[in-house]
Every structure is written in C-alpha cells, then in structure tokens.
Amino acid sequence: MALNGDVLVVEDDAQLNELVGAYVELAGFHYRRALDGRSALAAASERPPAMVILDLMLPDIDGFEVCKRLRSADATSKTPVLMLTALSQDEHRRRGMECGATGYMTKPFDPDELMEKIRETTKK
C-alpha cells in the first residue's frame, strides 16, 4: 500500500519530532516532518506518505480530527496512522481507533518498539 518510502511525523515539539524522525530513518524510511495539523494535512495531500506518526495534542487541529481528515481523503484513506501520544487513557485509545488509527503508542515510548511498528505497519 505504501506509495513511497516516506513517513510523516506530526509532532509539535520540534526536538521530539526530530527524535522520532531519527528512528524513522533507522527503520529504513525517509523522514518528513509537520509541526501542526494543517501542515500535516497539506503535506500528506501533496505527497501521500507510506505512514503517518501522529501526536494527538497539536496547536491547531487535534490528532483525532487530523486522522479523520486523512481517512476521508482519497489520497490518504488507506495510509497507516500510528498515534504516538502522552494520552494513555482507554477512552483516548478507543477514540483513536474509532477515527481510523492503525495503531496507538504512548509516550514515553520504547524506540525498538516504535521502529518495529513502523516496519510492521508499512508492510501491510
């Protein structure tokens, strides 16, 4: 399903975005970054990524809404979305899966687990 070898990391903390991006590259993919929901949606529609790693707490549009919009757009309707967030409550996990997330991980995260999820998810 992957259209290219890019993984779009959507995280408003620039340092954390780069850290996740480093793991994306270690997993064998090209890293693209977005620091908010609007730029993430624009980047994904311009060049659909193989996968999106999505924070939920963004400064403009929350991650749930970003995920819904990705799912409703033809170009990204099948793009895997891994939510990576500090929100660990079952309600948030359920909402994430209901809006179309492929997976859900909480921060702090295990780098090896993240890289495995990236590799697993992009193979589907």
Image: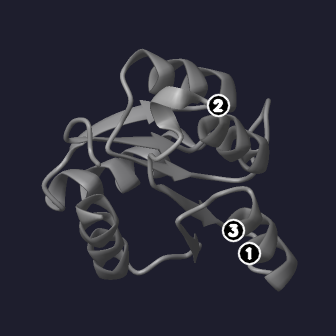
Cβ atoms under marks 3 and 2 closer than 8 Å: no
Query: Horizontal placement of 74 versus 62: left or right?
Result: left
Q: Residue at x 29, y 49 (%)?
A: 1
Q: Amino acid at mark 2?
A: Asp
Badge 3, how many Cα within 10 Å: few under 14, some, many 20+?
A: some
- The answer to which of 34 and 124 lies nearer the viewer is 124
Crowd around label 2: few <14 · some 14–19 · many ≥20 (10 Å): many
- Disc 1, disc 3: CB below 8 Å? yes
Element at badge 2? Answer: loop
Disc 3 versus disc 2: distance between alpha carbons?
Answer: 20 Å
Tell me the element at label 1: helix
Q: Of discs 1 and 2, which sits in the foreground?
A: 1
Q: Which mark is residue 97?
A: 3
Residue type, label 3? Met
Tell me if 81 is positioned left or right of 65 in this view.
left
Q: Nearer the viewer, mark 3 or mark 2?
A: 3
Q: Are marks 1 and 2 in contact (CB under 8 Å)?
A: no
> Compared with residue 122, is residue 42 higher up or lower down, i.e. above or below?
above
User: Where residue 87 sits in the image (x, y, percent)?
Assistant: 76, 70
- Residue 16 drawn above or below residue 71: below
Q: Secondary structure at mark 3?
A: helix
Measuring from the top left, give residue 3's x and y in whole percent.
Answer: 26, 36
Q: Earlier in the sequence, mark 1 or mark 2?
A: 2
Query: Looking at the image, which residue is at 81% across and 84% down?
Result: 90
Relative to 89, is 92 above or below? above
The residue labelled by disc 2 is 36
